[in-house]
Image: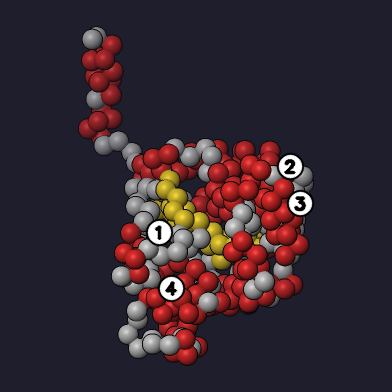
Amino acid sequence: MKKIKISDYKVTSEIDLKNSVTKEVYSDAKKELKDIRKKLGEWQNMMYAHDKYAVLVCLQGMDTSGKDSLVREVFKEFNVRGIECHSFKVPTDLERGHDYLWRHYLVLPPRGKFGVFNRTHYENVLVTRVHPEYILGENIPGINAVEDVNEAFWDKRFEEINNFEKHLANNGTIIFKFFLNLSKEEQKSRLLRRLDKPSKNWKFSPDDLKERKLWDQYQNCYQEAINRTSKLHAPWFVIPADDKPTARLLVAKILYDNLMAHTDIQEPELSDKIKSNLKSYKAQLDNE
């Protein structure tokens, strides 16, 4: 298997999704993933003990891009106390009563834990940009009609998202953002599979077909969002998603290689007082 270069997937300059690869196949992807996800689980235990950093993993992609199964497979070796996953759907009445980032703040990972956002705060510059009428439900001062949701509005929202992520990074959250880059042809195959397999029927919604008709609009919105918000402290990685095992391996590899660079994250050492009494503690237990 060829060596994975994580720099090939990191967005460091403007990208054009139309010319981005959607399929790569690593023949040993499943085997390699087993090894890396075990190492990730061990690293998370160390981070939990260190208790100074959190990790936020953001997953975005078109319907059927494989977000759910990726979460299941990449984080399978994690201690359940060390990871929390949240999926953001249509805002509730309570959530609409606050600013659009409020519900994301509520479930950010605490120090020592991984947080996975399966769909993220970027829905607020993706779905709402394709359907600007949704913004009216947020009851924002000065936004009274769709015409008010103009370029200046989106410029401000991108600035707010960048500031949000910068604030998190400054306070110890390590941020990864992954766009699962699925081809339209592969999405068609996966939607047909949902219809053909009774056990997958529940995943299908007629709305999937309505949104599919807006494919080009979504791609343009993803492209702009990625280009405007891929920062050194919160980079985007564009992952070819047509082959699920490869996509999972790439995400795991990117996580592990980047996290290993944080050499200050170590298991805490015992105090000198405790170290000097280890034999005594052991004797107490042996003599019970």
The kind of residue on which mark 1 rests is Thr
The answer, for residue 218, to whether it is visible in the render is yes
Q: Are marks 4 and 2 in contact (CB under 8 Å)?
A: no
Q: Which residue is mark 1?
A: 173
Residue drawn at (68%, 41%) of the image: 30
Of the residues under marks 4 and 2, which one precedes in the sequence? 2
The image's colour scheme reads: secondary structure
Report the amino acid beneath label 3: Val
Image position, residue 134 (x, y; %): 46, 76
In front: label 1 or label 3: 3
Q: Which mark is residue 161?
A: 4
Residue 159 lies, with reference to residue 26, above or below; the image says below
User: Closer to us: mark 4 or mark 1?
Assistant: 4
- Mark 4 or 2: in front is 4
User: What separation in Å lies between label 3 and label 2 (alpha carbons)?
Assistant: 9 Å
Q: Crowding at label 2, few (<14), some or many (≥20) Cα neighbours within 10 Å?
A: few
Relative to 220, say whether 122 is above or below: above
Q: Say which residue appears at 58% left-offset and 43% top-offset.
A: 73
Identify the secondary structure beneath mark 1.
strand
Please report the residue visible at 46 percent of the width from the left and 61 percent of the height from the top. Answer: 89
Q: Is residue 205 above or below residue 123?
A: above
Q: Position of residue 181 (x, y in %)?
A: 66, 63
Q: Earlier in the sequence, mark 4 or mark 1?
A: 4
Q: Which residue is mark 2?
A: 28
- For label 4, the SS is helix
Mark-to-mark CA distance, 1 and 2 = 32 Å
The circle drawn on residue 25 is 3
